[in-house]
Amino acid sequence: MAKIALLPGDGIGQEIVPQAVRVLKHIAPKYGIELEFAEALVGGAAIDALGVPLPDETLKLCQQSDAILLGAVGGPKWDTLPVHLRPEGAALLGLRKNLGLFTNIRPVKMLPALLKASTLKEEIVNGVDMMVFRELTGGLYFGERGRREVNGETQAFDTMVYATSEIERIARLGFVAAQGRRGKLCSVDKANILESSRLWRETVSKLAPEYPDVELTHMYVDNCAMQLVRQPLQFDVIITENMFGDILTDLASMLSGSIGMLASASIGGKVGLYEPAHGSAPDIAGMNKANPLATILSAALLLRYALGQEQAAAAIEASVAQTLAQGYRTPDIYVSGCKQVGTQEMTDLVIKNV
Ligand code: NAD
């Protein structure tokens, strides 16, 4: 029996997590998988109920589970709270740090049916198939920060810090992933300016001889942003530090049509966390408009990485591709000639096609 902790969180998280659970409950018996679900509060929902964004009982449930499925946290209601209470910072960073989730994996794949949904030309995005490994527990988001008075004015600072061990462990994951794919690893940094990036580049380069079947390249992050929209087919596996990865993965999401399509897995510790790459989308929350596919695809990653159920994961992915090929679209990926459906109906169709 695999224990799955469910953390719907805020906004559309409340709508899309239950839909992904419906898919999991439907597919599990077909593949002899036994799942047990337990739900807990996180983010703004936890602040409203218990006064903190990551309650102890939520963390405990996560630690005792085999995997976590999260929706999204945050929203305008909590934006003015002090930093230590903000859902995104305290809840997400707290989960990552406490669970040792040092890598976020985001597969970016253009499904043929969505070619027209991308804002980029078809010939540029046709065939896109890459994985981005973003470092998740170090770098700019975890370094020392603060404010100080200098020469009569306020100065704010954030610090980007990396240790070789932090770089090595994500680099190794990237090399191994590339070995299982097209054998290309691109390490993204800003080594022309940042000392932490110079260490990043040196450390990754030192590991390369251990993986002779992988072709390692290095790219500056600004160039990478440009190359991702200029010629995305050149990328197979990308590894990069925390903030660069945060920005590049949102950019890369548009290669697959919509941020509502992009799944993610955060791994490294005993328990992995699976969540869509998007936020809580307060602008469409409660309207049955949210695209549930990123969360459903995150559930597929959960089956693959946390439970080793490759066939069940692939079945969900195939069903999503088929549903799109049949012309069904949520509003975010709608193009004329297709059939527009809501969150609930899209999930019904995915379930029907499994
Ligand atoms: P967002 O990803 O929530 O929304 C950006 C745009 O994409 C919006 O127009 C939204 O409607 C659309 N969108 C996002 N997901 C969609 C989906 N599944 N289907 C259809 N459309 C979708 O980013 P934002 O607006 O910058 O942030 C909103 C809130 O979410 C903020 O409080 C932010 O801090 C938080 N956030 C949370 C996470 C997380 O929980 N991991 C990540 C990013 C942002």
Image (cartoon, helix red, strand yellow):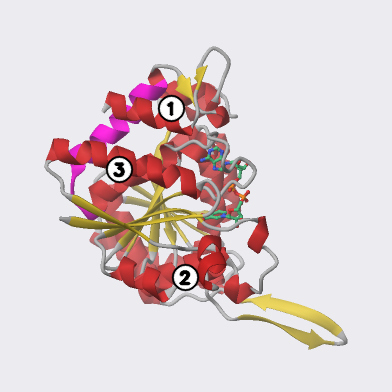
Callout 1: helix, strand or loop? helix
- The reply to whether residue 183 is in sight is no
Query: Identity of the amino acid at label 2?
Result: Leu
Of callouts 1 and 3, which one flags the residue occurring earlier in the amino acid sequence?
A: 3
Q: Nearer the viewer, residue 102 or 30?
A: 30
Residue at the far right in the pictured view: 152
Which residue carries the number 1 mark?
Answer: 345
Query: Identity of the amino acid at label 1?
Result: Glu
Give percent across and percent down for residue 237.
38, 48
Q: Is residue 289 above or below residue 252?
A: above
- In the rendered view, does 50 fall on the left or right side of 77? left
Q: Nearer the viewer, residue 301 or 216?
A: 301
Q: Quadrant of the C terminus?
A: top left
Q: CA distance from mark 2 to mark 1?
A: 32 Å
Q: Is residue 311 above or below residue 242?
A: above
Q: Looking at mark 1, is its residue's CB closer than 8 Å to ligand 1?
A: no
Residue at the far front in the pictured view: 49
Give percent across and percent down for residue 231.
52, 35
Q: Is residue 323 magenta?
A: yes
Q: Residue at x 67, y 81 (%)?
A: 146
Callout 3: helix, strand or loop? helix
Query: Identity of the amino acid at label 3?
Result: Ala
Marks 1,3: beta carbons within 8 A:
no
Of callouts 2 and 3, which one flags the residue occurring earlier in the amino acid sequence?
A: 2
Of callouts 2 and 1, which one flags the residue occurring earlier in the amino acid sequence?
A: 2
Marks 2,1: beta carbons within 8 A:
no
Q: Which residues are magenta?
A: 306-324
Which residue carries the number 3 mark?
Answer: 300
Name the disc covering residue 54, or none: 2
Q: Quadrant of the N terminus?
A: bottom left
Q: CA distance from mark 2 to mark 3?
A: 25 Å
Q: CA distance from mark 1 to mark 3?
A: 19 Å
